[in-house]
Amino acid sequence: MFYEPKKKNHGLPKNPFNSLIVPRPIGWISSVDTAGVCNLAPYSFFNAVSYQPPTVMFSAGAGAGDDRLKDSARNIEATGEFVCNLATWDTRDAMNLSSISAGPEVDEIALAGLTPLPSQLVKAPRIQQAPVHLECRYIKTVDIPGWTEADNYKVIFGEVIGIHIDDAVLTDEGLVDIRKMGIISRLGYNDYARVDGESVFSMERPG
């Protein structure tokens, strides 16, 4: 089949685009506003983009407030800080609950029954139940104009200035054992995938 996204002429029950670029890692972004209220939200338009400095990005769609910003984007642009926590199989229900549409006065960490931990270098809290936390300093926002105002996205870049790794997911040789982490990723529709021992394989680069 062939279709043109802007024409929406795929003829399928749902837009298939999100089911094609998969699996997408989930950035479970914690931030805090200028009044000290914490926010937590999962973003599947998320990834690492460079090694030195280590840099991550996530993309946030339009929010429901008067400024049309998601709470995460508003908080990060105002404070210059955030934390990326990695979502796992064990935290899948809490991650899903934290995606609820709620006002900026709602603390999704408390709502999801999670435990906040103080960070070392930023004010935004970490999530105790996550095996990895990336403390980030805001770099910049790139606006992606949409076909309508509701389609506008903000791609937020942050430099990773501090990394926490649960010792339980490290091997005796000092390597991260992805099999022990139980990381989950986003597929299309309402589907997710889990990284486990059966799905991991290795290949050596040529040369």
Image: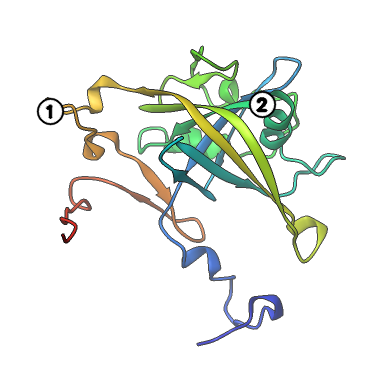
Q: Is residue 49 above or below residue 159?
A: below
Q: What is the x, y in percent for residue 193? A: 36, 52
Q: Is residue 7 above or below residue 23?
A: below
The amino acid type found where label 1 is placed reads: Glu
Q: Which residue is mark 1?
A: 173
Disc 2 residue crowd, few under 14, some 14–19, many 20+, Cα 10 Å: some
Q: Is residue 141 above or below residue 109?
A: below
- Please name the residue shown 62% across and 31% down the image: 138
Foreground residue among 178 and 79: 79
Q: What is the x, y in percent for residue 65? A: 82, 39
- Going by the image, does 115 lie left or right of 172? right
Res 22 quadrant in image: bottom left
- Going by the image, does 114 lie left or right of 175? right
Q: Residue 142 shows which numbered tag?
A: none
Foreground residue among 14 and 166: 166
Secondary structure at numbered mark 1:
loop
The amino acid type found where label 2 is placed reads: Gly
Q: Residue 80 shows which numbered tag?
A: 2
Please identify the residue farthest to the right as the structure is shown: 66
Q: CA distance from mark 2 to mark 1?
A: 36 Å
Res 156 quadrant in image: top right
- Labels in figure, total: 2
- Please name the residue shown 21% across and 51% down the image: 200
Given contact means CB atoms under 8 Å apart, are the residues at marks 2 and 1 in contact? no
